[in-house]
Image: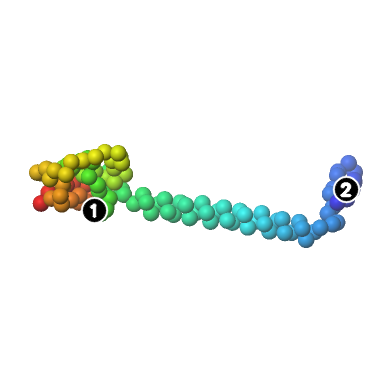
């Protein structure tokens, strides 16, 4: 690298490794493109997960889950699912609940509802 001075202005002239400079510039451009594609992909995936309109609890039955861990008689949006990891329930088939396959959660008019058979 040579530095030339003309009338008080420093100019840098690259005389060695021009090909290295080009490789670095290309790598920087590729990195920027990669970051852009990654961010775009992340936003597209996020948009797919956010398909429920404000004011709606659900779009399909898969968006609804039992509201209680044990002997549930109501349903809520899957995004509000209760933590049931360390809770143990009795094997009782309580009436008017979804125990033992007596009912299921359904999306009815954009609301999660328990349908008891």
Q: Which mark is residue 38?
A: none
Mark sitting earlier along the chain (2/1): 2
Q: Nearer the viewer, mark 2 or mark 1?
A: 1
Residue 87 % position (x, y): 26, 38
Residue 84 sits in quarter:
top left
Q: Residue furthest bottom?
A: 19
**Residue hosting label 1:** 61
Dot 1 falls on a residue whose secondary structure is helix
Q: Nearer the viewer, residue 54 or 7?
A: 54
**Which residue sits at x=18%, y=46%?**
113
- The reply, left or right, for residue 93 in relation to residue 21 is left
**Which residue sits at x=31%, y=48%?**
53
Q: Which mark is residue 3?
A: 2
How crowded is the residue under tag 1: few (<14 C-alpha within 10 Å), some, or many (20+)?
some
Q: Is residue 75 shown to the viewer in this render?
A: yes
Residue 17 % position (x, y): 81, 58
Residue 62 % position (x, y): 27, 53
Q: Nearer the viewer, residue 46 or 67?
A: 67
Residue 29 % position (x, y): 65, 56
């Amino acid at each position: 690298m040579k530095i030339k001075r003309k009338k008080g202005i420093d100019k840098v002239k690259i005389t060695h490794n021009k090909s290295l400079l080009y490789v670095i510039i290309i790598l920087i451009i590729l990195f920027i493109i990669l970051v852009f594609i990654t961010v775009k992909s992340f936003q597209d995936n996020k948009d797919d997960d956010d398909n429920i309109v404000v004011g709606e609890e659900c779009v399909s039955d898969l968006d609804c889950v039992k509201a209680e861990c044990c002997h549930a008689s109501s349903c809520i949006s899957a995004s509000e699912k209760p933590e049931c990891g360390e809770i143990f329930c009795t094997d009782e088939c309580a009436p008017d609940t979804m125990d033992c396959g007596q009912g299921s959660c359904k999306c009815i008019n954009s609301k999660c509802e328990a349908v008891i058979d």
